[in-house]
Image (cartoon, grey):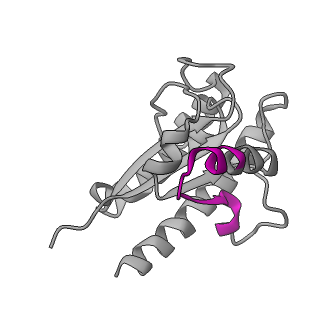
Amino acid sequence: MRREKIGLLFVCLGNICRSPLAENVFRQLARERGVEHRFEIDSAGTSGYHDGDPPDRRTAATARARGLVLTGRSRRLTGADLRRFHYVLAMDAANLAEVERLRAASGGSAVVRRLREWDPDAAELDVPDPYYGGARGFEEVHDMVERSCAALLDELLQDAA
């Protein structure tokens, strides 16, 4: 029996730091477990500030130091995304509010949540935007995203079993 792929869309503001990181971390985790084929994984931003740009160089450098090469180009979230993907995972409360607004306007049926809802170490649910901070912020965001994506993958695989 062939199962439908589970669609996951990771969303931040500009789609150059947090969401492309989450997209690629989740993809790598799924690949390592031999289940990448069960998922459709993408990322987008609530703004079009960086349309077509590659991931932020600092995010890419942090990921590369951990053995992960970031791929993709920034794009803006659309109403069609909220009808196409099963899960839309926002990085913070502001992103969540914008995704919810667009979902209501587009008639989308995606489950919309914040990624850190799966972070076992979360004291708060926002993945902070490291864009205007220093290198330590990118490291901390990577840690949050890795923990959250690993727990999310575990839950999705358990639910599909």
Please give the name of the residue rendered at 57% of the width and 53% of the height, measured from the top-left corner. 88
Name the side, left or right, on which 31 lies relative to 92: left
Q: Position of residue 22 (x, y in %)?
A: 57, 47
Q: Is residue 136 left or right of residue 155?
A: right
Where is the N terminus found, in terms of image quarters? bottom left
Nearer to us in this view, 115 or 133: 115
* Residue at 84% over, 27% down: 132
Q: Which quarter of the figure is the C terminus placed in?
A: bottom left
State whether residue 142 appears in this view. Answer: no
Q: Quadrant of residue 119?
A: bottom right
Residue 67 % position (x, y) = 48, 41
Q: Which residues are magenta?
A: 101-118
Q: Position of residue 32 (x, y in %)?
A: 35, 58
Count the marks: how many?
Answer: 0
Image: 113 above or below 52? below
Q: Note whether residue 117 is visible.
A: yes
Residue at the image point whose x is 84% and y is 63% from the top: 124
**Of the pair 68 and 36, the residue shown nearer to us:** 36
Q: Is residue 44 above or below residue 109?
A: above
Which residue is drawn at the image coordinates 54% and 43% (left, top)? 66
| Residue 51, quarter of picture | top right
Front position in the image: 106 or 129: 106
Specify whether residue 43 is painted magenta: no
